[in-house]
Amino acid sequence: MANRLFNSKTSMFCEKLRVVLTMKGVSYDVVDVRADNRESLIAFSNQRKVPTMDIDGQCIQDSTILAKYWEEKVPEPTIYPDNPSDKGLCLMLEDWADEDLNGTVMAFRRAQNDDDVKKAEEGLAVHLENLDLLYSGRDFIFGRMTLADISIYAQLHYLYTSLDREIDAKYTHVHAFLERMMKATGVSSIKDVA
């Protein structure tokens, strides 16, 4: 039975998982949940959350859980650093990206007036300043692409693909990181998704 990914092309969590699946060489069929208003997803899983995968009839949800599942099934190439303490930090950074950075990015989507947009911009600036420092002098946080980088990329990339926003050019290390991630994932334009 083929693996099926219930996917929304613009979901940052689906993009995160698609990068992991591609990195690991996992084949899958895509079910675009927007094409049928999530009816196929609901029929399979009794819920609306993406990403969800049908893996030989088994329903698994959530990008973090699915990334861990595929790491166990296909350990090479690994999505985690080799050192156990670095792996712990990687998982913390993944969670930070999925929760805190995501909350800031989604503030743009929820913004209803100029004040809301200004607050979102101020919140994002704090994260971008920190990320610019983090990526200064290094290609990836742990020397090679890991789940932390993938999670951060998916959140920042959403600004371009779904919110039609751009990251200020002064964050040169963030821009260099985005370029490296685009190259690694085969994305030719910042507006395209992996």
Image: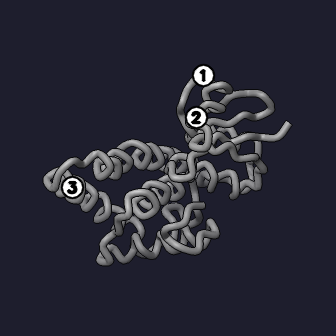
Residue 82 in view in this figure: no
- Which residue is drawn at the image coordinates 48% and 60% (left, top)? 153
> Local crowd at mark 1 within 10 Å, few (<14), some, or many (≥20)?
few
Q: Earlier in the sequence, mark 3 or mark 1?
A: 1
In this rendering, position of residue 122 left or right of residue 156:
left
> Local crowd at mark 3 within 10 Å, few (<14), some, or many (≥20)?
some
Q: Which part of the image, by quadrant, shows the C terminus?
A: bottom right
Kindly state the secondary structure of the residue where label 1 is placed: loop
Can you tell which of label 1 and label 2 is closer to the viewer? 2
Mark 3–mark 2 distance (CA, rounded to whole Å): 30 Å
Residue labelled with disc 3? 117
Find residue 125 and report its image quarter.
bottom left
| Residue 25, horizontal then vertical, whole percent | 76, 55
Mark 3–mark 1 distance (CA, rounded to whole Å): 35 Å
Q: Compare residues 160 and 177 and report the one nearer the observer.
A: 160
Task: Please count the marks in the image.
Answer: 3
Kindly state the secondary structure of the residue where label 3 is placed: helix
Checking the image for residue 122, the label placed there is: none
In this rendering, position of residue 15 left or right of residue 156:
right
- Which residue is drawn at the image coordinates 43% and 57% (left, top)? 162
Checking the image for residue 38, the label placed there is: 2
| Residue 186, horizontal then vertical, whole percent | 64, 69
Q: Compare residues 31 and 76 and report the one nearer the observer.
A: 31
Mark 1–mark 2 distance (CA, rounded to whole Å): 10 Å
Can you tell which of label 3 and label 2 is closer to the viewer? 2
The outermost residue toward the front is: 36
The outermost residue toward the left is: 115
- Which residue is drawn at the image coordinates 86% and 36% (left, top)? 1
Q: Compare residues 178 and 133 and report the one nearer the observer.
A: 178
Checking the image for residue 46, the label placed there is: 1
Relative height, residue 121 to residue 29 (above, below): below
